[in-house]
Structure formats: structure tokens, C-alpha cells
Amino acid sequence: MRSSDNCYCLEARIVSNHVSMDEQIELWHERLGHMNFRDLRTLGKFNCVRGLPKLGKKANGICGPCQQGKQTKSMHKKGKYLTTKEPLERLHMDLMGPMQTESLGGKRYIFVCVDDFSRFTWTYFLREKSETFDKFKMLCTKLQNEMNLILKH
């Protein structure tokens, strides 16, 4: 209805002021930090918490966040990994490029070599992709001379 001062007055009646028992259980479950439902009913039964009603049984005894919190990762099976026992036993190499931007020296490729045993890394910048093998031969010679070790095939 419209009153004289251009305000509308809506007359409404409260149909129900009760929340279903399941919703009450869920509400208190969340309020008390996702306490398990059995303990929640025990608190209500003995009036341990002010305002907590006596709660009945809940059909679905676990909420979504509780299910997520109980998830675990399954373990991966440990495989047999080949491990190296000395430096230069296994080298991992990668050639990247051509890069969009040249270096100051005009180099557009990057050759990376990593020792599996020590994880020591050598990096070379190359102008052409074809320089890779020459750099690798140079690295082999350098490593054999410095470390007195022979690269295995």
C-alpha cells in the first residue's frame, strides 16, 4: 500500500523462523571449526555450549571442506634410477635457439652442458647452430686436461 508521504508499506508475515535440523548441524559444525558430528551432538546433549541446541543425526556426516581436508596424495613407486659415481660419467646437453634478440656479440644460440654427478654447468653462446660440435669437442678437451678424467662413450 502507498502511504501519504510516497512511501510504500509492505505487510509481511514470518512463515517460519526455524531452520531445518540438518542446516543447524552444518551451521554449528562450521562455527566450531568443522568439529566431527558425533562430538557436536555430545556437546548439545550435555549443554556444554551456550545456545547449541540438541542436535539429531545427520544423514551425510561429512561436509565438502572436510572431505577436501582428508584427501591425501598417493605415493609414487620408486623406480630404479641410474646414478653416476664419478664426474663426467654422464653429460646432459641442450641447444637453444635461434633467439629473437642477438647478444652484443651477435650470438643467437645457447649450448648448455650439465655434468650429472656434480651438476656443474657449462654454457656457451654461439653465432651458428653448426658451431655446436666444435664447442663440444673443445669442452671435452678442456675437461680431460683440467680434471685428468677421460670422457666415457
Image: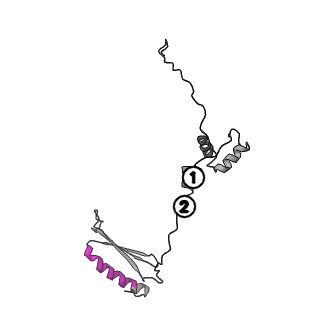
Residue nearest the viewer, comparing 135 with 68: 68
Residue placed under numbered mark 2 in the picture: 72
Location of residue 113 by image quarter = bottom left
Task: Give left or right: position of 91 versus 76.
Answer: left
Residue depicted at 29% across the width and 80% down the height: 134
What secondary structure is found at the residue carrying circle 1?
Answer: helix
Q: Residue at x 35, y 81 (%)?
A: 139
Residue 49 in the image: above or below residue 94? above
Per the rendered image, the range of residues in magenta is 127-143
Which residue is found at the position 29% from the left and 76% from the top? 132
**Mark 2: few, some, or many residues within 10 Å (few <14, many ≥20)?**
few
Q: In this image, 127 relative to 122: left or right?
A: left
Residue 49 coordinates in the image, percent (x, y): 71, 42
Residue occupying image coordinates x 42% and y 84%? 146
Q: Within 10 angstroms of label 1, few (less than 14), some, or many (20 or more) residues?
A: some
What is the three-letter code of the residue carrying label 2? Thr
Secondary structure under the numbered disc 2 in the rendered image: loop
- State whether residue 138 is above or below residue 21: below
What x and y, as percent, mark residue 153?
37, 86
